Image (cartoon, coloured by chain):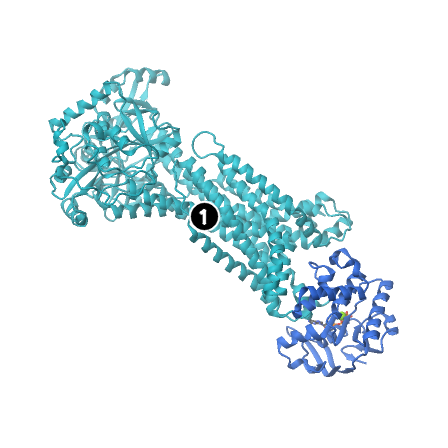
Chain colours: A cyan, B blue
């Protein structure tokens, strides 16, 4: 009996293959997108985790200094401590292949004699790593062992040269042998080189330094660890290896959550399609249901019957989606690793790891979504009274009467959304705000019946006057067939709403970033090894360059830039040292509150910088940019009368940290220390994301781990920052160097005397250093373009996801009109028999579909505008800490309106045109 | 009023040909009430549709109200259906979205007269069929007989040259059917309305001027 009934259901599915197919496709697409994102995210994180695990090996503990190298002598000292069973010193850096083989590669400098208890790399003696190769590895400069995977991938043989970039410098390494990792895990998908410690230190310009020391302790781990920790010099931390993976996870959590939520939207829109499909089938089979009920079918069975129909579509669509999702995951992974690498840290996942758990999850989600969507109309069907002649118009009337109630429910949902939007738990992206987004979508879906009914009724007199009977009837059909059209209108409105919201958000964000680059990044030329790739923290400007720049007659001022990245709570934190006096002079940093000049002076400008009255006043947010932006300063900054009067030594451009052997600067450093001892906490400024993520405010104290121990720093200001690589702390570079005592620079900004010479100076710098180093010389304009390009790449995936949701919704609107008009074939024929012309019938259908599309647009635009506010002011703020200035983009509204109207009219016109073609009589033939 | 000569109708379904009408010649004068009967599938509805301009014939000549339907362009044919013909169907065929009054007014509205006037006229015609009290109801809220009376009012509102009815009583019980047939007779009597009515029912004989019976595509 049951089987027979389900066969009946199945035959209904196959009776309208087009409609069923679109429903299935909608679910399939939604599932596919959702799955591909979760697979890609899992794969890239897994690959990263595998790398972290592989590099950690069996190490239990790791000695590190926050953002700085350890002194080599520490290894000898620690190794001799009684708690330590084994120790291994390591330097590491991500290099880049040049020449025909591109891509990042991790270089580990190891002591092969200390390594064995840790990573147990199998130095395959059989495959060429004989005594001679071994000797070569230990003694020859540039000799490396490559992983067997890398050798296989790139076809490397012993003796092959390997051209690489070490930071900015070009080097050629040599393959001395191949090794194998018995654990099978490799970082960067096998892109791993091993080098002898001493050779690596030399190559990386870290002689006498270590990046970390891995340890295995004797006896009870934790007790030994706490004993050991007491013996460590200040600034050296004992940590668990592998925390790095967790920090990356924390860092990309927001990125990932945003994508996951976006990808779920397509599925959500797909639910409307299923709802639609089952409702249509209920409406069409109302007589059959009545008959079956008279024949003794129970309510529950009717419910099951229709649930089964939804379930069949969901299960099949879900399965299709799984296949499609795995295929799509490949492209999503490529985009995602590109994003993650340029935003956070090098990730090189090339293969999608198909996890059964994720497959089941996506499929379960698809099935659950369809069940929920099918349940509502199935319940309606089950309520049918036995033997009642159930007119569709009764259902329509019920819906029309309830449309007000739905509207009130929608208002409630909106109110609840408002409540959730202001609610906040902890830091990072929070569920209430996503719930708020969902509630907004729901609210507008609930408004749809009310809006459709009212739009139809209100416009009827007007359109009747304008278009005659077609206008009149079109309006009536709109408000009179809610059961069929409202759902599609709602689905399309939701998809459009999301599209508009995301477009407005991205557009605003882009504008904000654009004006941020203009306003708070000054400089004519940005010069360094990695201007855009913020993940390259250990890429330094070659030492020989700065003196040359200082002598350059075209250069007025030099801004020094030094950056380290350290773990901070569950995130990474950038600590940046910069020449604040140059910033004070030329502008830079855009503070969310407080007087820019005062903050700048507090951080670095006051005792060493330029007098306030000769310095440019950096623009405060909201105030117009001064024109010209860079007021003239006399060369070297030391011939200004005011400067001469000052007691502190004259300022030389770029010579602020004074780590180039000048005695004057040593004095200035002691000055600095003196200030600290005078119980004045050093002042820093922090980025808005740092303030937002951890709840710091202006005037708070920040406890910052540094190699010189934990430092208590006063937060003088919070500035807007849209870098994607995490929260940051900025301080004067002299201050920085008291904590990180080295003289390295990551980059410099050059301020020219003559702005017309930018291109000439760029060319000259490339000519002077380009052959030995790969250094970028980027003009301000190029910097802006580069940043916006990265920006666009980052959001490419977002747009793609949105596009899919809209495609699914468009499926919905097409099916709706196909079905709606086909069902009305008879009525249309009757109208023709009564004397309506084809033109009148066509325009009647167009009025209806046009109004429906227009309504979707209006609801979508309202919903999208609200959502964009939520995205901008709540979700993004929580997830990333960015304040985005709202920039209205009318373009997206016009574009969606045109798109939707065109699609809506076409999907109405096609079936209408078909309906007026055949001979009337054939349709009107008595049943 | 109606003049058919050698009218044939062939339905083609793939290679199969069904000859629904096999050369029908027939004249019906203005003011005449003709009733057509015959076995199911003999071609009655087809004939009626051809007269009403709902379907073209395959060959032969169809002249209704002075118009040669085969020669009329689509727009003229639409106008002919709208202004000169009223049709009543077995299954009432009212638009479910509209009230009875609006259904009745529809042909006038399609002619382009003002809504208020069309409704006024519709009110008048509903009174004629004794449905004035039901004017605001939707079709699903009234009985079958009432629906059919509204359909007749709709067919008459344009004062058509011919009133065509295809088994108008087929879905009704015999008492109601009698009322409907009485209505047709009254219309015919009072306004000298030309009526062509298809029916199986024997009692139709009591109302019509002329009885035609069909068999297998021809008039006997
Ligand atoms: N659209 C069509 N395609 C093919 N054959 C058709 C079509 N319409 C009618 N026929 C055939 O033409 C013949 C005449 O049909 P018609 O509907 O005129 O019969 P009828 O006399 O009205 O029958 P009934 O009393 O059952 O209504 C029948 O054999 C029918 O099968
Ligand atoms: Mg018939």
Given residues A269 and A244, the one toward you in this image is A269
- Residue drawn at 52 percent across, 40 percent down: A361
- Residue A317 on image: x %, y %: 55, 49
Q: Is residue A276 above or below residue B18?
A: above
Mark 1 lies on residue: A801
Looking at the image, which is closer to me, A494 or A620?
A620
Can you say whether A166 is above or below A23 in the image?
above
Label 1 lies in ligand 1 vicinity (Cβ under 8 Å)? no
When the figure is inspected, residue A371 is found, relative to residue A919, above or below; the finding is above
Task: Determine whether, in the image, residue A788 is placed left or right of residue A736.
Answer: right
Percent coordinates x, y for residue A548 in the rendering: 12, 39
Residue A169 seen in the current view? no
> Which image quadrant: the C terminus of chain A?
bottom right
Location of residue A591 by image quarter? top left
Chain ID, mark 1: A
Within 10 Å of disc 1 (Cα), the crowding (few <14, some 14-19, many 20+) is: many
Residue A731 quadrant: top left
**Front in this rendered view, residue A90 or B166:** B166
């Amino acid at each position: 009996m049951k089987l027979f009934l389900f066969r009946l259901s199945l035959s209904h599915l196959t009776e309208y293959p087009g409609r069923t197919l679109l429903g299935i496709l909608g679910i399939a697409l939604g599932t596919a997108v959702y799955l591909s994102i979760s697979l890609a995210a899992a794969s890239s994180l897994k690959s990263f985790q595998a790398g972290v695990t592989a590099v950690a090996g069996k190490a239990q503990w790791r000695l590190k200094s926050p953002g700085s190298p350890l002194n080599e002598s520490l290894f000898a000292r620690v190794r001799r401590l009684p708690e330590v069973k084994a120790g291994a010193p390591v330097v590491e850096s991500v290099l880049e292949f040049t020449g025909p083989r591109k891509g990042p590669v991790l270089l580990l400098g190891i002591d092969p004699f200390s390594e064995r208890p840790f990573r147990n790399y199998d130095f395959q003696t059989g495959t060429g790593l004989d005594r001679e190769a071994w000797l070569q590895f230990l003694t020859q400069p540039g000799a490396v062992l490559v992983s067997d995977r890398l050798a296989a991938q790139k076809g490397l043989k012993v003796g092959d040269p390997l051209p690489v970039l070490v930071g900015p410098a070009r080097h050629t390494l040599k393959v001395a042998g191949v090794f194998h990792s018995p654990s099978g895990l490799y970082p960067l998908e096998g892109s791993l080189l091993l080098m002898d410690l001493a050779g690596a230190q030399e190559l990386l310009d870290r002689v006498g330094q270590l990046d970390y020391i891995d340890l295995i302790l004797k006896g009870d781990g934790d007790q030994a660890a706490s004993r050991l920790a007491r013996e460590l010099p200040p600034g050296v931390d004992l940590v668990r290896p592998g925390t790095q993976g967790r920090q990356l996870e924390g860092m990309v959590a927001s990125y990932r959550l945003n994508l996951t939520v976006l990808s779920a939207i397509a599925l959500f829109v797909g639910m409307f399609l299923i709802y639609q499909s089952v409702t249509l089938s209920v409406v069409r089979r109302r007589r059959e249901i009545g008959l079956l009920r008279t024949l003794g079918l129970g309510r529950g069975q009717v419910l099951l019957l229709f649930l089964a129909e939804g379930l069949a579509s969901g299960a099949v669509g879900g399965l299709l989606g799984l296949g499609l999702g795995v295929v799509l995951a490949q492209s999503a992974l490529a985009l995602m690793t590109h994003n993650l690498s340029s935003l956070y840290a090098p990730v090189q996942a090339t293969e999608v790891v198909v996890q059964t758990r994720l497959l089941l999850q996506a499929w379960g989600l698809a099935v659950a979504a369809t069940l929920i969507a099918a349940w509502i109309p199935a319940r309606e069907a089950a309520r049918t009274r036995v033997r009642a002649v159930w007119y569709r118009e009764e259902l329509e009337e019920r819906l029309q009467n309830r449309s007000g109630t739905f509207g009130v429910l929608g208002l409630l949902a909106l109110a609840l959304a408002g409540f959730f939007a202001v609610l906040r738990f902890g830091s990072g992206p929070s569920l209430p705000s996503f719930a708020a987004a969902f509630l907004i979508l729901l609210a507008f879906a609930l408004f749809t019946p009310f809006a459709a009914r009212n739009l139809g009724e209100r416009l009827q007199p007007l359109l009747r006057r304008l278009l005659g009977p077609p206008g009149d009837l079109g309006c009536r059909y709109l408000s009179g067939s809610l059961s069929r059209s409202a759902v599609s209108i709602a689905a399309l409105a939701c998809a459009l709403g999301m599209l508009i919201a995301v477009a407005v958000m991205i557009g605003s964000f882009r504008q904000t970033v654009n004006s941020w680059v203009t306003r708070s990044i000054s400089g004519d030329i940005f010069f360094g090894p990695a201007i855009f790739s913020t993940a390259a923290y250990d890429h330094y400007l070659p030492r020989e360059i700065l003196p040359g720049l200082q002598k350059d007659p075209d250069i007025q001022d030099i801004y020094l830039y030094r950056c380290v990245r350290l773990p901070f709570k569950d995130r990474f934190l950038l600590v940046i040292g910069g020449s604040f006096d140059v910033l004070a002079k030329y502008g830079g940093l855009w503070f969310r509150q407080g007087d820019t000049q005062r903050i700048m002076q507090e951080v670095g400008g006051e005792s060493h910088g330029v007098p306030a009255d000769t310095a440019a006043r950096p623009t405060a947010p909201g105030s117009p940019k001064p024109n010209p932006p860079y007021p003239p300063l006399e060369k070297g900054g030391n011939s200004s009368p005011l400067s001469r009067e000052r007691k502190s030594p004259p300022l030389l451009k770029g010579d602020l940290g004074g780590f180039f052997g000048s005695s004057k600067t040593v004095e200035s450093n002691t000055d600095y220390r003196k200030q600290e001892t005078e119980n004045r906490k050093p002042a820093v400024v922090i980025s808005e994301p740092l303030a937002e993520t951890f709840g710091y405010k202006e005037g708070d104290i920040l406890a910052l781990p540094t190699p010189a121990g934990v430092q208590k720093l006063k937060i003088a200001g919070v500035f807007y920052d849209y870098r994607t690589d995490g929260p940051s702390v900025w301080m004067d570079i002299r201050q920085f160097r008291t904590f990180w005592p080295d003289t390295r620079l990551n980059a410099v900004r050059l301020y020219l005397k003559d702005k017309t010479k930018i291109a000439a100076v760029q060319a000259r710098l490339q000519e002077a250093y380009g052959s030995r180093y790969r250094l970028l010389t980027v003009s301000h304009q190029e910097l802006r373009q580069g940043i916006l390009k990265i920006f666009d790449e980052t959001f490419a995936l977002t747009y793609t996801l949105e596009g899919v949701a809209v495609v699914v919704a468009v499926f919905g609107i097409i099916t709706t009109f196909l079905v709606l008009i086909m069902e009305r074939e008879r009525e249309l024929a009757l109208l023709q028999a009564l004397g309506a012309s084809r033109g009148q019938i066509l325009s009647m259908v167009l009025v209806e579909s046009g109004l429906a599309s227009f309504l979707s647009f209006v609801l979508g635009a309202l919903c999208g505008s609200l959502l964009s506010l939520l995205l901008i002011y709540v979700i993004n703020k929580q997830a990333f800490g960015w304040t985005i200035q709202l920039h209205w983009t009318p373009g997206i509204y016009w574009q969606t309106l045109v798109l939707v109207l065109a699609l809506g009219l076409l999907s109405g016109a096609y079936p209408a045109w078909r309906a007026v073609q055949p001979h009337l009589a054939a349709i009107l033939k008595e049943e | 009023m109606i003049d058919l000569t050698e009218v044939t109708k062939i339905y083609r379904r793939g290679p199969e040909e069904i000859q629904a009408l096999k050369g029908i010649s027939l004249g019906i004068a203005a003011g005449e009430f003709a009733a057509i009967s015959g076995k199911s599938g003999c071609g009655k509805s087809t004939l009626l549709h051809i007269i009403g301009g709902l379907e073209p014939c395959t060959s032969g000549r169809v002249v209704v109200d002075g118009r040669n339907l085969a020669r009329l362009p689509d727009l003229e044919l639409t106008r002919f259906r709208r202004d000169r013909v009223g049709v009543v169907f077995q299954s009432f065929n009212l638009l479910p979205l509209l009230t009875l009054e609006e259904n009745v007014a529809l042909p006038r509205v399609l002619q382009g007269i003002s809504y208020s006037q069309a409704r006024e006229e519709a009110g008048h015609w509903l009174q004629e069929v004794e449905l004035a009290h039901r004017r605001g109801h939707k079709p699903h809220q009234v009985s079958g007989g009432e629906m059919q009376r509204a359909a007749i009012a709709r067919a008459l509102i344009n004062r058509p040259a011919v009133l065509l009815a295809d088994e108008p009583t087929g879905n009704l019980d015999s008492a109601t059917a009698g009322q409907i047939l009485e209505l047709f007779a009254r219309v015919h009597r009072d306004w000298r309305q030309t009526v062509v009515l298809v029916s199986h029912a024997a009692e139709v004989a009591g109302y019509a001027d002329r009885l035609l019976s069909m068999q297998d595509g021809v008039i006997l």
